[in-house]
Image (spheres, grey):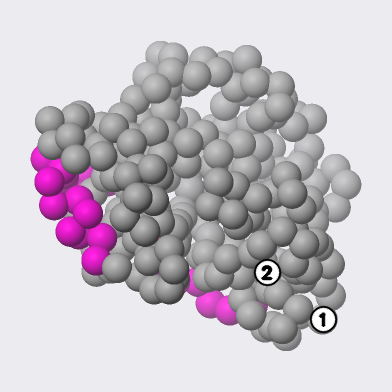
Amino acid sequence: MNCCATPVWAEDTRIHSYDADATRSASLEAVCRLFLEAAWSHAELLGVGFEQLRRQGKLWVLSRFHLSCGEMPRWGQAVTVRTWPRTSRSVFAMRDFQMLAAGGETLVTGTSAWLVIDAATRKPLRSDRMLASVTGLSDTRATERDPERLPELVGVPACVALEARYSDVDVNGHVNSGRYVGYMLDTYPAGFHVQKRPLSLEVNYLAETREKEPLFLDSLETEAGTWCHGLRKADGLEVCRARIRWGDRL
């Protein structure tokens, strides 16, 4: 591990046409993708990235994710993505994110909880040992709270049937974390995203999904402007839970 590497990663990028929806704002899935890509890049710099762990028979797995959306970036907008690891919490390795406008204004913030797992057994390992040589870890937070354990969505009769596709699968051989968010965004009625904007996103990742596996997505508006989602496999095994708060588009 490179113990002298910077504890904060920052990269400049731009919101491309494929990141934006019909409102010309970046989608939640696109923001998640940018944050997670920055996390992978920083992990490589710190010596605990994909290749380093693969050689040890280990994998990083995202367990929980929380985004707070002040203003979604727009198509063509230049942004800076910042990310840094925090002190481990229980079995979780914590990592925070910021997305800043060119003038330094904060657009979106996020925090995440990761597990290190054995690639063969899929059992979690001690993440604090992985980060023991990283200097400069702090408890500086990008959001007010850590991602929470969400309640299971039960008693919802209607569901959307899906199938994990080739384009959904990432380098770990399972459906990419951001694609689950995309699945959920696709369930809203036509015109919903034109009228509403995301205020926050919370996701709990509970199990892996492989290509061609059938999935069933349940959705329920639990209170005005708050939608909960539950994704499960054909045998009932939960894959993930999510909660999205929406507000009127300005």
Q: Residues within 10 Å of mark 1 (few under 14, many from 20)?
A: few
Q: Which residue occupies the foreground of this view, 180 or 186?
A: 180
Identify the secondary structure beneath mark 2.
Answer: strand
Q: Is residue 82 magenta?
A: no
One can see residue 108 in this view: no
Q: Amino acid at mark 2?
A: Leu
**Residue extending farthest front:** 55
Where residue 11 sits, quadrant-wise, is: top left
Q: Is residue 15 left or right of residue 121?
A: right
Q: Is residue 127 magenta?
A: yes
Classified by dominant secondary structure, the portion drawn in magenta counts as loop
Identify the secondary structure beneath mark 1.
Answer: loop
Q: Are marks 2 and 1 in contact (CB under 8 Å)?
A: no
Q: Is residue 19 above or below residue 50?
A: above
Quadrant showing the N terminus: top left
Q: Amino acid at mark 1?
A: Pro
User: Which circle's residue, 2 or 1, is located before the other in the chain?
Assistant: 1
Q: Residue at x 76, y 53 (%)?
A: 165
Q: Residues within 10 Å of mark 2 (few under 14, many from 20)?
A: many
Q: Residue at x 24, y 66 (%)?
A: 126
Numbered mark located on residue 224 in the image? none
Q: Position of residue 37 (x, y in %)?
A: 48, 36
Q: Which residues are magenta?
A: 126-153
Task: For marks 2 and 1, give the one nearer the viewer.
Answer: 2
| Residue on which the image places disc 2 | 231
| Residue on which the image places disc 1 | 157
Q: Which residue occupies the foreground of this view, 94 or 194?
A: 94
Q: Residue at x 36, y 30 (%)?
A: 82
Spatial distance from mark 2 to mark 1, Cα to Cα? 13 Å
